Structures are given as C-alpha cells and as structure tokens.
C-alpha cells in the first residue's frame, strides 16, 4: 500500500487546556507573563488528563492516522519504533505495549528510543537503515514531570503524540547529520522525577552547534527550500530564522499554537504546514531536532510521492 506524504501522519494533543496567563496570575504577575510570552510563545498548553499516559496519546494519534487511511494494512509494517522519555513502565518499553494494543503481527521488529527532542529524526535515521517499512511513534507527557510551577518549563511544554508511516516508496532519507555536546546532560533532564532545563545553556547550544550545523548543510545542499525545526521556544525559533535569513528559506513555526511537544513537535509542525501548503514531488526538505543531550540531529528527506 502506498500513502502520500501528508497522509502518512497522525497526531494528537492532551485534552486538558492550560491557560499560561492564569498560571502566572496565581504565581507571579501579568507583567512577568507578558515578558515571558515574548520568549516562550504559547498562551495555551495541552496536558494529558491525569489518568492518561504517553501510550494513550500515541493510540489517539494512531486512530487519527487510520481514520484518514482506512485501507492501511498493518501486515506491511515490518518495524515499530516508539520514541518517548515517559514510558508507562521502566521496562518493557512502550513499543511492546503499543504493538499489542494495535495488534501488530508478532514477528514485527520492536525498537524503543529514549531520545527527547531529536527523537523523530533519530527514528527516521533508524527506519531508513532497516529492512521494510516502519511505523514511527513519538509520544511525551512532560506535564507529569512538572510538579510545581517553574518559569523555564511550566509555560512551554505540551503533551502530544504523532504517528508516521515510513513507507520507502514515498520518502527517502538522503543524509543525516548529528552532534552532541559532551558533559551537558544535566542542562536538560529529570532530577528525582522533576523536569529541569537550563534555558541559557540550551540557547547557547542552539546559537552555536545547531546554527553552525544548519548553515553547513544548507550551503552544501542548494535544493533545500524548507526547514522543519523542533519547536523549542519562540526565542529559539526567532534566533534560527534571523541567523538563516540570508538563505531565503521557508521556516514554518507553530510554537505559539501548541507549545513544545518534544519528540512529536516536527510531525505536528509538518501537518500544520500541509493544511494550507503543498510539498512538490522530489522536493528535499530538512528536518532538525535538538535538545536533550545536549544534542542535535538533522536529516535531508526526499519526498518521492
């Protein structure tokens, strides 16, 4: 079965809408909210309900995918790659739970990736190297790790999930680039189950490693006209656009609309873009994820159908 690029995706968000302004009114002030909003971006965040998990969000995204593709044949899925940092159990990984939930055949190859914001690109890279077609699932419930209001995280992260059917007839990963900063793992992590982020360190990483990598790729690959970046924050989005403005690229953004959905942010961004735009056959697009590690990974994806 062959699906076109747009229909290869399914996405979902947490159903609990969080008003960031109300959070600030309770904890700080409206003046500080307005100042923060120019840096973070979203006014509304989406949290999974208390009794729902990353697996539930993933299943919702899968249902949205299959509604669009009623003839989708699960027997053609050779590999399942599940990306999450918020597994239902410490072990096994969510791939085993998800494969059972949607009734994949028992000889499906199952992979679990704990990758954070590079997760979707990591999974694409892996799927491209594996035999056969792959179902890539990204799902996070960061809200479960925000116990008290924290200015660096409470106004930024949403719970979300995505499903992408990596059909080699439709798409091809041409090349992948990656880098990580040594001894930076404490800059974005969970400590005693509480989410911690050093915003200054993350921004610095983007300003140097991420920008340098993107610039190098674009200079050597003139066919690239569109970049889909991980939606980290409004500050980061503006930085990337300003640094790359000389190349006259299309750089979509939806951080204001749904917040940072971690590993599923690039699929959510692509779906939003394709609602009103098209990507032509044989186009080459650049996908870039960055964050936990600190790390960055980028892939050139050719759209074949």
Image (cartoon, grey):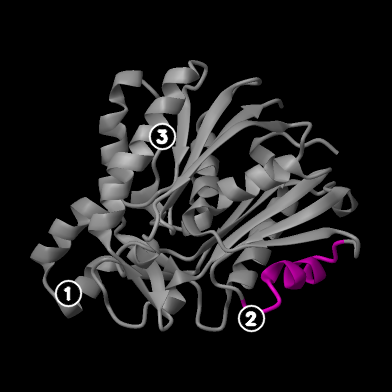
Q: Is residue 82 magenta?
A: no
Check disc 3 and report the residue beneath it.
Answer: 213
Residue 169 lies, with reference to residue 144, above or below; the image says above
Image quadrant occupied by the C terminus: top right
**Could you tell me residue 95's position as x and y percent?**
72, 66
Q: What segment carries the magenta color?
A: 88-104
Tell me the distance, in whole angstroms, between the alpha carbons under discs 3 and 1: 40 Å
Picture residue at 81% right of the left edge, 49% below the top: 70
Picture residue at 44% right of the left edge, 23% below the top: 218
Check disc 2 and report the residue beneath it.
Answer: 89
Residue 301 lies, with reference to residue 195, above or below; the image says above
Q: Is residue 162 left or right of residue 68?
A: left
Other residues around mark 2 within 10 Å, as few (<14) / some (14–19) / many (≥20) = few
**Could you tell me residue 108's position as x and y percent?**
86, 59
Q: Which residue occupies the extreme front position in the image?
A: 182
Q: Nearer the viewer, mark 2 or mark 3?
A: 3
Picture residue at 71% right of the left edge, 45% below the top: 127
Q: Is residue 265 left or right of residue 253?
A: right
Image quadrant occupied by the N terminus: top right
**Between discs 3 and 1, the one toward the N terminus:** 1
Secondary structure at numbered mark 1:
helix
Q: Nearer the viewer, residue 247 or 256?
A: 247
Secondary structure at numbered mark 3:
helix
**Between discs 2 and 3, the one toward the N terminus:** 2
Check disc 1 and report the residue beneath it.
Answer: 25
Other residues around mark 3 within 10 Å, as few (<14) / some (14–19) / many (≥20) = some
Tell me the distance, in whole angstroms, between the alpha carbons under discs 2 and 1: 35 Å
Tell me the distance, in whole angstroms, between the alpha carbons under discs 2 and 3: 35 Å
State the image quarter where residue 63 is shown.
Answer: bottom right
Q: Is residue 153 left or right of residue 261?
A: left
């Amino acid at each position: 079965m062959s699906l076109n690029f747009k229909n290869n995706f399914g996405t979902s968000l947490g159903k609990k809408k969080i008003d960031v302004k109300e959070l600030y009114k309770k904890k700080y002030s409206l003046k500080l909210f307005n100042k923060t909003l120019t840096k973070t971006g979203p006014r509304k965040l989406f949290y999974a309900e208390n009794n729902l998990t990353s697996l539930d969000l993933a299943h919702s995204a899968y249902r949205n995918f299959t509604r669009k593709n009623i003839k989708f044949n699960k027997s053609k899925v050779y590999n399942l790659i599940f990306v999450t940092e918020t597994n239902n159990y410490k072990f096994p990984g969510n791939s085993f739970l998800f494969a059972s939930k949607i009734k994949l055949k028992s000889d499906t190859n199952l992979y679990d990736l704990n990758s954070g914001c590079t997760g979707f690109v990591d999974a694409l890279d892996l799927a491209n190297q594996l035999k056969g077609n792959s179902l890539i699932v990204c799902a996070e419930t960061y809200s479960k790790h925000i116990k008290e209001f924290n200015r660096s995280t409470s106004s930024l992260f949403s719970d979300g999930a995505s499903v992408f059917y990596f059909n080699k007839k439709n798409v091809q990963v041409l090349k992948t680039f990656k880098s990580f900063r040594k001894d930076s793992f404490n800059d974005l992590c969970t400590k005693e189950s509480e989410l911690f982020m050093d915003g200054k360190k993350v921004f610095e990483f983007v300003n140097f490693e991420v920008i340098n990598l993107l610039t190098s790729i674009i200079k050597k690959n003139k066919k690239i006209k569109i970049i889909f970046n991980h939606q980290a924050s409004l500050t980061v989005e503006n930085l990337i656009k300003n640094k790359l403005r000389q190349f006259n690229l299309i750089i979509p953004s939806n951080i204001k609309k749904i917040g940072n959905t971690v590993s599923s942010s690039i699929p959510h961004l692509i779906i939003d873009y394709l609602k009103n735009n098209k990507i032509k056959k044989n186009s080459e697009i650049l996908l870039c994820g960055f964050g936990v590690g600190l790390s960055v990974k980028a892939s050139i994806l050719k759209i074949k159908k």
